Image: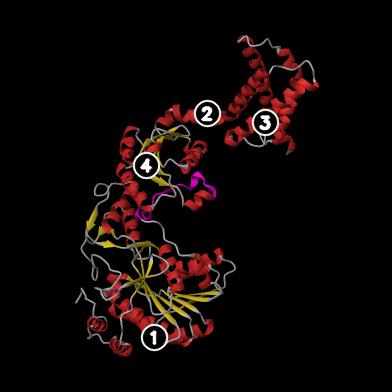
Amino acid sequence: MRFKRLLIILPMMITDTAVMLISGWLAAILLQQTGYQELMFGSFLKYFPILAGITIVIFYFLGLYAGLWSFAGYRDVLHVICGSLLTTAIYYIGSHFWLSGLGQSVSFYITFSTFFSFFAINVRMYARYKKMFQRLFSVAAKKSERILIIGGGEAAHTLLAEIASSSLYAHSMVVGIIDDDPLKKGMQINGYKIFGGREKITFIVEKYNVTTIIFAIPSCPKKDMADILEICHATGCQLKTLPSLEEFRHNFHISQLRGVEIEDLLGRDPIRAELGDVMQYVAGRRVMVTGGGGSIGSELCRQIAAYRPEQLLIFDIYENTTYEIQLELAKKFPDLNLAVRIGSVCDKEPLDKLMEEFRPQIIYHAAAHKHVPLMEYAPAESIRNNVFGTLNMVKAADKWGVERFVMISTDKAVNPTNVMGATKRICEMIVQSYNIKSDTEYVAVRFGNVLGSHGSVIPLFRRQLKEGGPLTVTHPDIIRYFMTIPEAVSLVLQAGALANGGEIFVLDMGEPVKIVTLAENLIRLSGLEPYKDIDIVFTGLRPGEKLYEELLMDEEGLSTTQNELIHIGKPIELDSDNLFRQLAQLEDKLLDDNVDLRAEIKKIVPTYQPMVK
């Protein structure tokens, strides 16, 4: 092994020795030609064997023979300069004080050190220069990927260095940089010009035949990012972006570049809970999540598991996704006390036995039917699962002394036009009513649509894209509030930590987004042109669907919390006794096919305006 290592570094040492000899010869010739002083190259040669040995030892301890020259970088340059200065200093001292008669003028030492540093650095950088010139002048480079970088900061500097050294981009060429800072216009980073602000993007793309745009501002506010990416979309270029700021700072590699996702175009910064609040609330507690295999439920389990609960109980009726989250958590959190049970919130006796066995202290109730059009055609099932499943859970929480019960609600519960939304409004009423009569603290958290959840519009669009289109949108003016699943869940967890009982927490969903705009952006993200490559078809509003959703009822007012993104809707006064009488009557009528269940729901939720009769 040592012999092989010697075979690798020996050519490097021989090259440095040759460079040293050439540098001394050039220094002597230069000073003789300028007439500055008559020098004897022979004097240098007499000291040269000692100088070469000292230099090799110094370079060795500086690590200049530990790395491969094909990957030489700025640290190697600094080490060469330091080594050269140290070598020259020893040369000066030795030739003047130890070996009298071999000393040179100060000019010779300065000139020699300059030449030696220059040649030693460029010999090491040769491999990188070769790659750069190959990209600039080869035929392959002229036909390859041409890159425009957005952002003229430290991230762009790091990215350019990664591109220069990566074989993945051996046949790519960076044409320049875009940055909105007017003071940077005309300046350069690593030799690449900053053309100007975002208004120059389209012009530069056309002028230099840009094929790829890389967004290299990991700290950019999402609103600005969305605006810039909209301009980039219109160019038809492939779009890439850096990972998150945390990942970028940790240890960025060129392979971490990713395609722009639909979440990048929401136009707002990511939302996260205050870790301290949730940690203090969840850590060391027995926590149960109903619907734990679903989109929201599984993310609740992921985030709760990270806060070190005493035990996490996952309860769901659908075994496949529940099994998947069980495997995921077992691998990611091997020390987690995890229990998984399959069952329905509609089955009272098995539910009661489950509560007796595990005695959860906190319950997150996410189990529910959520698909609006399907529930329009199955109102009895929606009522059975959503309303009476929730009532079963609420009663069980009261009976077994649960400390806090957090129900996941929806913006569709506000002035509902569909059965699903109306049933969720009844669930909110149940939660608020039971909070008055129980020692358990009951709260509900209300938010809008989440990107990527089962049955949401984004997975549907992606399937339609894969099939070649068209993308189907119900109405050109339909809008929705959107959040990512992790964002929504982090706020749900913090809302639960802030609860005192009886509240309906309302999450700030940002600005509403047009569904047709989402469809257009998703098509562009795929490198296609809306209405040209992939069509968008308007199919008409589905049963129970509104053009827009609301987060508050007219009677509710908002109060603030310590988190500006979480608000509390003012509780509406309820006649609890009358509510539970109406629920008992509704339960009796579920099996009667002649009963208009929508009319029965409206008796309980006066704001319900059914669209299907």
Cα gap from disc 4 to disc 3, whole angstroms? 41 Å
Q: Which residue occupies the foreground of this view, 130 or 26?
A: 26
242 relative to 449 in the view: left or right:
right
Does the rendering let one see residue 206? yes
Q: How is the image coloured?
A: secondary structure
> Please, what is the three-letter code of the amino acid marked with disc 3?
Gly
373 part of magenta stretch = no
The magenta-colored residue range is 250-267
559 relative to 398 in the view: left or right:
left
The answer to whether 509 is drawn above or below residue 559 in the figure is: above
Query: Which percent across, then down, holds residue 503?
Result: 38, 77
Cα gap from disc 3 to disc 1, whole angstroms? 78 Å
Query: Which percent across, then down, holds residue 517?
Result: 28, 54
The answer to whether 298 is drawn above or below residue 261 in the figure is: below
- Mark 4 crowd level (few <14, some 14–19, many ≥20, 10 Å Cα): some
Cα gap from disc 2 to disc 3, whole angstroms? 25 Å
Marks 4 & 2, CB-CB < 8 Å contact:
no
> Please, what is the three-letter code of the amino acid marked with disc 2?
Lys
252 part of magenta stretch = yes
Query: Which percent across, then down, holds residue 141?
Result: 43, 31
Q: Which residue occupies the foreground of this view, 515 or 528?
A: 515
- First in sequence, mark 2 or 1: give its number: 2
Marks 4 & 1, CB-CB < 8 Å contact:
no
Which numbered marker is on residue 83?
3
Cα gap from disc 4 to disc 1, whole angstroms? 56 Å
> Please, what is the three-letter code of the amino acid marked with disc 4?
Asp
Which secondary structure lies at badge 4?
loop
Residue for badge 2: 130
Cα gap from disc 4 to disc 2, whole angstroms? 33 Å
Residue for badge 4: 180
Residue for badge 1: 436
